[in-house]
Each structure stands twice: as C-alpha cells, then as structure tokens.
Image: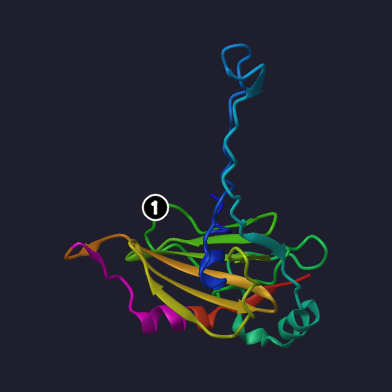
Amino acid sequence: MNRTLLFSGLLAGALVLTGCDRAFQRPADTGEAEIADGAGGEPAESGSELPVRPEASASGATIDWEAARRDLAARSLEAGETSFQIQSGGEAPPVPVFMPPGPVSAQGGESDARFQQTSDGYYAFFPGDAYDTIVNGTNVVIAAPGQVAQPRTDEFRFQPTTTGAQVAFSRYGADYLVEFECKALVHDQPACITEEEAVAFARDLAISGTR
C-alpha cells in the first residue's frame, strides 16, 4: 500500500491537482468540407484550442541530514527501540524516519505492525484495538498551480477525516502524516481518538533512522 503522497496537499496549503485540457479536432474532409467562395474555395475555419490550465508542481525537498543525525545521536539510550530496526546511512529511506518510541506490538489487530521503505519516503502501519495507526514520511513537495510551496513549520496540524483523524507536521525539510483509522463508529461518526490524543501521539514520535 502506497500512501506517501496522500498528505502532500494538506501540507502545501490548497493543493489542486489539475490536468491539461486539450481540444482535439478532426482533420477537415476534402471536397465538401471546403466552402467555395466565388472562383476559389477556402477551407472551413478550425476551432481554437481550449486554454491549458497550469498543473501542480512537485519537487524534492531539501533535507537537513546533519540536524537529523545530530538529533538521532542525542537520543537517550533509555528511550528504547521501536519494533523495527531502521537502517541508517546510504541505504536508509530518503527522509529521516519518525516512529513511536519504545517497542511497538500489535494490540489485537488483524495484522502485524509493518514498515515499508518507498521511493520518496516510508510507510509504517501499527494495528490496534480501537484504531489502526499509519505513519507516512515523504520528501515530495507539492505546490498548487501557479504558487510556490509553503514554508515548512514545526506546527502540528490536526484534521478529522471520514475514517478517523490525521495529524501533519514537518521536520528537517520532510513532510509527515500520522493517520488514525477507527474500527467502529459512534452515531455514524468516527470518534476513536480526540484531537489532544492524536497530537500527543504525533509529538511523541521519535527520530529512529537517518542517512
């Protein structure tokens, strides 16, 4: 499952992905398609093409690897390790990896916790009883058509979703999204986690790997 681009629009502000509209015209038929005017015939005018709308632009983020390595080295050994051994160095994901601190185990979920490196970041899944948690990281920066990418900040941005909630944040120039997918509805609404709980979970994520 590749969710690495799911949250780029939220972090870029108002992301609108649009394609180029093109008007294709059939070539004019010879003979009857030409309209005679006096002695000579003039071909029928062809319709003009629709204007091409600008597309959203995507680019690679500039990652502050030095700061990430410094923070990883400063982590207390007492903090423990996650359930994944995140490789550092040249083979590490293209963004610093943030994971829940301490061992992470399945809490009655239908599948085990898992980690997957992607071409632009990583994806981590943690099953739970009330909700499943997904952590995404990406180095892709997307700007709305005609606009530049918004500056990265340390702000944690909460947003409810149709399946639960999500919290977005940026670190070292990379973008991260933490998703909470509820397993049950309350009055037809996902209410498995509060904003305070979701933001606290995102704040507690610890840097666990870097290049």
Say which element carries label 1. Answer: loop
Q: Residue at x 51, y 74 (%)?
A: 168
Extreme residue in the front direction = 38
Q: Which residue is mark 1?
A: 110
Query: In terms of image quadrants, where is residue 161?
Result: bottom left
Image color mode: rainbow
Return the residue nearer the eye: 207 or 1: 1
Residue 83, position in %: x, y? Answer: 58, 66
Residue 78 placement: quadrant: bottom right
Q: Amino acid at mark 1?
A: Glu
The answer to whether residue 181 shows anywhere in this view is: yes
Q: Position of residue 162 (x, y in %)?
A: 33, 62
Does the stretch in magenta take in 37?
Answer: no
Residue span colored magenta: 188-201
Residue at far left of view: 187
Horizontally, residue 94 falls left or right of residue 82, namely right
Dot 1: few (<14), some (14–19), or many (≥20) neighbours within 10 Å? few
Does residue 195 belong to the magenta stretch? Answer: yes
**Image point (64%, 14%), residue name:** 30
Q: Quick one: quadrant of the C terminus?
A: bottom right
Q: As rendered, which of 53 and 60 lies closer to the eye?
A: 53
What percent of the width, then of the height, locates residue 96?
69, 72
Residue 54 found in image quarter? bottom right
Residue at 43% across / 61% down in the picture?
Answer: 127
Residue 16: x and y in percent read 52, 61
Q: Where is 31 relative to 180, above or below?
A: above
Q: Is residue 93 above or below residue 150?
A: above
* Count of number-bearing discs: 1
Nearer to us in this view, 177 or 56: 56
Outermost residue, top direction? 31
The reply to whether residue 103 is in sight is no
